[in-house]
Amino acid sequence: MSRPHHPPSLFSVELRTSQWAELVAWYRDTLGLKVLLHVDDSRYALLDAGGSRLAIMGRPNPGEPSGRWSLGFETEDLDAVKLRLGAAAGAPRTHAEGFRELVAVDPDGNHIRLFTWAPGHHA
């Protein structure tokens, strides 16, 4: 008897940083993510990111930010997020696919994409 195939689900994205406390505070206070776990001794924080989680891990040599990936967050109110991000975010753009998006940069230089669907559009 064969078992049904269940693909793995993404539990978290791990973000390594030398600015651990600052990055945890930015994702919590500026983006509004809820901290699920915060361990000062090991410099590890796990934040609720909707259907997944963001793990922020303090490391002495985390490497450079990558232009090969970005974190994408869906939000109901892009304009309110833009106000909270201030100078860290560019101007919102409307895409032909039916969403508005802005790109922000976190304190480590990682690109964050925030978007909202136009009425009647959704993936």
Image (cartoon, grey):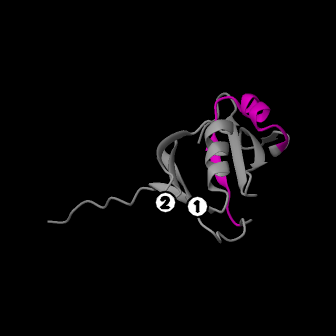
Q: Which residues are magenta?
A: 68-87
Q: Is residue 114 visible?
A: yes
Residue at numbered disc 1: 58
| Residue in view at x 67 percent, y 62 percent | 69
Residue at numbered disc 2: 42
Coordinates of residue 6 in the picture (x, y in percent): 33, 58
Q: Is residue 50 visible?
A: no
Q: Is residue 84 magenta?
A: yes
- In the image, is residue 60 above or below residue 88? below
Determine whether label 1 and label 2 are within 8 Å by CB.
Answer: yes
Q: Residue 8 bears which disc, if any?
A: none
Mark 1 vs mark 2, CA separation in Å: 8 Å
Q: Is residue 83 magenta?
A: yes
As drawn, which residue projects farthest toward the front? 41
Residue 80 appears left or right of 73? right
Coordinates of residue 38 in the picture (x, y in percent): 49, 47
Quadrant of the snapshot with the N terminus? bottom left
